[in-house]
Image (cartoon, helix red, strand yellow):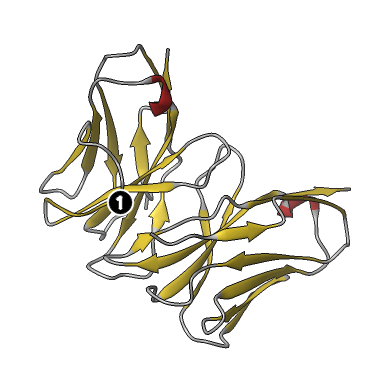
Amino acid sequence: DAGVTQSPTHLIKTRGQQVTLRCSPKSGHDTVSWYQQALGQGPQFIFQYYEEEERQRGNFPDRFSGHQFPNYSSELNVNALLLGDSALYLCASSQGGGSYEQYFGPGTRLTVT
Amino acid sequence: ILNVEQSPQSLHVQEGDSTNFTCSFPSSNFYALHWYRWETAKSPEALFVMTLNGDEKKKGRISATLNTKEGYSYLYIKGSQPEDSATYLCAPLSGYSTLTFGKGTMLLVSP
C-alpha cells in the first residue's frame, strides 16, 4: 500500500500564476481533505471532497478550488497566486463520512516569488 | 471556528527525561481529538484518536489523556529518546471529519 501520495514535491511559481497540486488517497479511501500550513502555523483546513463534490470548506477565498475524480484522486487549484500562498500543502485521505482516521501525504511545498 | 492552543511551543530535553504537552480547545462542537507526530520531511503520523471523556491511550512510551468537559488533552512521553524529536500536533475533529490543528509543540531530545 503506497499510502497517500502527492505531487509535485516542490514547486516555484510567480505572483499571478496558477498552480495545480495533486493527491492520490490511500487505497480504499474515498474522501480527500486539503490543508495549508504556512510558516509557524498549524495546518489549516482548505476543503474536503467526497463523492466528487466539495463537502465542506474552510475560510479560504474562491481562488482556491478543487476537484475529485472517479478514482478518488484529487486536485487543488490556486489561481492568481499571491506571495502569501507560499506554504506546505497537505492532503489527507479517509474513508466515508465522519471517519475518525485520517492519513496524510508528505505535502507539496509551494513557493511564490 | 475552533481555537486550539498547544503548549509549550517548543521543548528541549535530555535523553531519558519524561515530558508532557498540553492541548486545549473549546469543550463543545467536536467529536474526536487527534494527536499527530510530525517528523521533518515526512508525513504527519497519527498517534491517537480519542473520543471519550476520561479516555486514556498508550502506545509504547507515549500516552495521552482527554478531558472533554474542560477541553484539554495531555500527551506524555516517558524516557524520551532522540528519535522522539518531532513536532506534536493536536486537532479536534468536527463537521465532516474536519481537523482544526494547533500550532504544535516542537520537541528536541538530545543524546
What x and y, as percent, mark residue B9? 69, 50
* Image side of residue B111 versus residue B67, left or right: right
Q: Give me the residue at 32% from left, 55% from top.
A: A93
Residue pointed to by mark 1: A33
In which quadrant will I find the N terminus of chain B? bottom left
Figure quadrant of residue A65: top left
What secondary structure is marked by label 1? strand
Q: Is residue A48 visible?
A: yes
What x and y, as percent, mark residue B32? 43, 74
Q: Residues within 10 Å of mark 1 (few under 14, many from 20)?
A: many
| Above/below status of B109 relative to A65 | below
* Image side of residue B40 versus residue B45, left or right: right
* Image side of residue B110 versus residue A28, left or right: right
Q: How many marks?
A: 1
Q: Give me the residue at 38% from left, 27% from top.
A: A85
* Image side of residue A92 versus residue B52, left or right: left
